[in-house]
Each structure stands twice: as C-alpha cells, then as structure tokens.
Amino acid sequence: MTRRLSLAPWTYGFIVALAMWVVTSAYSGIDSAGATLSGALAFGAFSVVVGTGQMFVVASGPGNIDLSVPSVLTLAAYVSITVMQGSDGMLLPGLLAALAVGAVAGAANFLAIVALRLPPIIATLAWSFVFQSLAFNLGGQATLKPPAGLSRFTLMNLGGVQFMPIAVMVLTLVAMVVLKRTVWGRQLLATGQSEPAARLAGINVARVRLIAYMLCGTAAALAGFLLAGFSGGAALNMGDAYLMESIAVVVLGGTSVAGGQANAVGIWGAALFFNLMSTMLNTFGIQAGVRFLLTGVLIILIVALVPRPRVR
Amino acid sequence: MSDAPARVPARSPSNPRSALLNAMQVGLPAIALLVMLAIIFSIRPAAMSYFGFHLLFKLSVPLVFAALAQMMVIMLGDIDLSNGAFVGLITCITALYLGDAPAIAALCYLVLIAAYAGLGLLIHARQLPSIIVTLGMSFIWLGIAVILLPAPGGSAPAWLAAFMSWQPPLMPLSIWLAALAALAGHLVISRSSYGVVLRGAGGNPRAVQRAGWSVVGIRVAVYAAAGLLACLAGLTLTGLTTSGDANVAPAYTLLGVGAVILGGGAFTGGVVSPVGTVVGALTLSLAGSLLSFLQVPPTWQIGAQGVILFLVLAGRVLLSERAR
C-alpha cells in the first residue's frame, strides 16, 4: 500500500470519537470527561476483542465473515462460568475452557465451509444456531455467579487507569505485529488479496484460513469470559449486540470487506466512536429510535465519504 | 420441480446429464420439504388435510416474500442485511396508518421503496460494499420504526387480517401465494429475456454494460423491486400478527439468505432461482414445526434447525460433486 498524504481511512473513527467526547464533556461539564472516556474505553474493549478476531476472518478473502461470534461468546461465557463454579481458584481452568470452546468453534466453522463448500455466511450462521442451543441447555440450570476475582479483574484500577482496556490495547499491538511481521500475518493478507496467487506462491491457504477462524472464535470466547465477569454473570442475550457491531467496527476501522487488507488500530477508533456516540446521545436524553437512526446515518456517511484504497 | 438453476447463459449446462443434476440441485430443498412433510404426516395423519396445511404453512407467507426480496439483491452479487428491520418498519406503518389513513400508508410505502432504489444508486455510484451500507440501513429502519411505534401495538386493518385468514378453494392461502410468487419469479427472472439481463448484471456487469444496458438503471430497479417484495412481506406479516412491532422480524434477514442459498443461489452474483428460493423459505419455516412434532425439547430446537440446514446443504455438495 502506498503512503498517502491525506488522512488514512482508519483515523476517521478516532476523529469522530474525539469530537463526540468533546461535545459530551462540554454539555455535561468538564468534570465528567474522565468518567465518559473510561466508560467508553471499558465497553469499547469488548468490541475491540471481538472485532479483532472478526478482522482476521474478513481479511482472509472476499466473502469470509463469522456470524457465529455472538453465540460463541455466549457459549464460552456459560462454559467458563460452569467450570469455575464461582471459585477464584478455578480462574485459569475457566479461562482455558473458554478459549478451547472458541478454538473448537472456529475450527468447526472452517470445516463446514471447506467440507460442505458453503459460503462462510451460511456455514457460520448454521453453527451459530447449534452453539446457541448448547448455551441454552447449559444456561437452563440455576444462574451461576462469576468468581469475585474475575469481576475484580475486569474492573481493576491502577492509579485511576483501568487495567482491562490497557490489556486489550496490548492485544491490539500484538495483532498489529502479527499482521505486519509474522509469516502467518503476511500469508493471511496474501491469501485475502488473491487466493490463486497465494496458492501458487506455495502458501497453505486452507491452514491460513483455519487459523484465522480459530483466532476469531478464540477472541469471541475471550470477550465472553471477560464480559461474564464484567456484567456479573452470563446471560443468553449477552452476545446479541456484537453480531452487527463486530462487522461495523472492522469495516469502519479501515479493513476492506474485499479482504487482503487489515487494520487493527482502526478498530479502537470505531469502537470508541460507537460507545461515545451512545453515551453522547444518552446525555442529550435522546430517545432510542433517534439513537438507532443516527447510528445508521453515521455508519453510512463514514463508509460513503471516507476515501478507500482501491483493492480490486 | 423442473427448474434449472438460473445461470448466466455462457455457463448453462450443455449436456443433458449435468442439466438433470442441476435440476436435482434445485429440487433438493423440495425433497427435504417432502421428507419433512412425510415425517409430520406419519406422526399426525390428521395434519394431512386442508386445515393441517393451513396451520403448518401459515407463517411462511411473509418469509417467502422476504426471501424473494433478498434473492433480488443477491442476484446482483450484493447482500441485504437490513431486510428484517425493513419488514419490521413496514409492520409498524401498516398497523398505524393503513386502517385509518390509507393514503398516508401508501405514501410511506412509496417513499420507502424509493429509499431502497436510492440505496442501490448509492452502492453503485460510490462502489460501496453492500454488506456495510445495508448494515447501516438496518439501524435506520429500526430507528424510524421505534420512533413511530415505541412499543408493539397498533392494529392491522380488518380487511388485511381477513385476507390472511381467508381460506380459498383447493389449497390454503399460504400455498397459493407461494405458488404464485414462485411462478411470477420464474417467468420474470428465469425465463424472460429481461431476466437474462438482470442476472447478467450480477454475473458479468461489464458484458451487460457493453451490450448497451444501463447497469445503474438495473441496480436501481432491482433494489426497488426488493423494497416492494419486502413491503409485501411486512403487509402479510401484519395481517398474521394483527399488530405492528419494530423488532418482529430481525430473523428474516438471515433466514432469507439461507432460503436463497438452499434454493440453489450463490453469492457470486447472477446465480439465483426464484422457485428454489420459495421452496427454501417453505423448508426453513416448516423445520420449526417438524421439530415440535418430533418432540425435540425447545432448548434443542434452534440447534436442530442448524443441523437441518447443514444436512440439506450437504446433499447439494454431494450432487454437485457428481456433476463434475
């Protein structure tokens, strides 16, 4: 990709988010600016974790998308909470169980795409029905509380700075390095740009995509694990909001839906934009309908106005 | 089911054997549908009657129209993630205005169909990914619907509710409507010369452009048709539920996509089958009833629907493998 002098597409999310933060703070007093930002960072962190996984899948080629994200998130939350049984000592096994659920779910998604030659949209949709059913059956028992340690971790403060968003920022940095510097990252983008060319260059395209889907499932599972601690337990609809949001933050973050090009930092801008906008409209006391309307208008405006690198 | 999958002419099957296999590929959801009906009838022979069919397929009517709307967009190589939210908005407008102020309701429908056409224009003019534009539109439709009708309510005009519970001769209304929709779609999309151009605009837009057609015009017209079909889905749904609800139909978006793919469609553009889509929509809406008849516990029903989707699609792969 050539360097351009004009603003890169992914910076628009940050700019809009910043504008919204300033407007919200101006409206409700400068004292609340810190609280507004830390709230947006905490909620945005979950969107970023889910979105980063979705980014790997979207970048792996045109048509690749994972619609099972919300159900994997929910299922992983239920499995980990069931494993932990509310005891702090079981935190690590709980985390590992969640991650394992995510990895297996991702592998199952990819297997269905390859073995049945299904469009990813359909394969991941059908699996999401199955995962949803599994979560539903696990959740049928009495609601289990997350261990106090997990809740403490998700809300932990280090001298006024929340720990979890920082950890997720580190994760974003790792994702950037993976995309730019590792063999798999380069292979992923090459596969996304042109599958035949990548294959002729000796890349094991199937393995590259398998890893992308497994990473996506694992990321969704990690978000489910953390969200269960953050919101005091697992709920059957806890993942619903993340279906559309995971796609929106990836695309608004500067990743091309045509594949072959990914941007990990941009996801933060888009996630902050989404969360700060709902905070802003809430402080203005705007009703839910108008909030939805403005969200949609802004998504379309950003996509329509932002100059995009020509991929095709 | 002699409907060959609608293909771009250049790729149409040349030998009779692959033509037969192609026909079977589209016929597969039909076979699945018959198998499901056979299982239901063997459990409850009483369901094998006019009234039984009426109950089994009653709720499929709106899904059939929503799936056909989705098919129009998929035909162009796009996807419409706002379909379900749009149907919800139409139910709100119908329940609020159609009874008392039909002129306002009609005006709303026209404006919304024009908005769909404008969506096609925007996607074409700026070469935007339809998936993200329609994702944004889904928020807009939902927002308007919630502004109009914050909580489910309103009431369907009496004539609409009466029409949806009308029991015409020979077959239940749902089967009549599905058959008519499939026939109309088949004649326009799969058989007419315009249909070839429409499918061509999805499969090979450059060739259609060179042949002197306006691809922009086609995209706008096809999106408007998708809007009209989604309006019909909303109208029939309101007739069934007799009230408006912004959140009544989000599932239609992905069920519609599933029906198109089950019916032999593909995301590559230009490959769709109206008959297959209608049968696919009937199959998906019957899957729920089948699972109740099999006494699958409610907690497993949605998962079993996923498995049914996989089974039918796996059959498609087996057939297309043999066609090679």
Image (cartoon, helix red, strand yellow):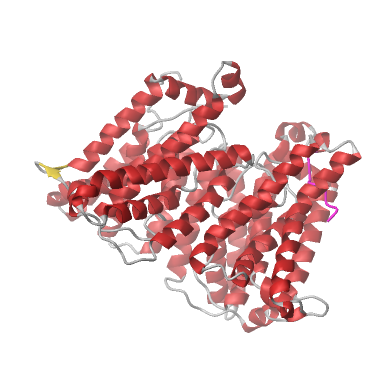
Q: Which quadrant of the figure contains the C terminus of chain A?
A: top right
Image location (x, y in percent) of residue A185 = 43, 24
Above or below, B50 against B286 in this view is: below
Image location (x, y in percent) of residue A256 = 49, 33
Q: Main secondary structure of the magenta part?
A: loop
Q: Is residue A35 left or right of residue B300?
A: left
Q: Is residue A97 left or right of residue A39?
A: right
Foreground of the two, A220 or B151: A220
Q: Which residues are magenta?
A: B1-8
Residue visible at 41% across and 43% down? A102
Can you see residue A16?
yes
User: Among all residues in the image, which is located at the extreme top?
Assistant: A201
Image location (x, y in percent) of residue B315 = 71, 48
Can you see residue B218?
no
Instruction: Write down the quadrant of residue A287 in the picture.
Output: bottom left
Q: Is residue A215 left or right of residue B100?
A: left
Residue visible at 51% across and 31% down? A209
**In the image, is residue A64 part of the stretch drawn in magenta?**
no
Instruction: Write down the quadrant of residue A182 in the picture.
Output: top left
Image location (x, y in percent) of residue B220 = 66, 48
Task: State how many labels appear.
Answer: 0
Above or below, A291 against A301 in this view is: below
User: Among all residues in the image, which is located at the extreme left?
Assistant: A159
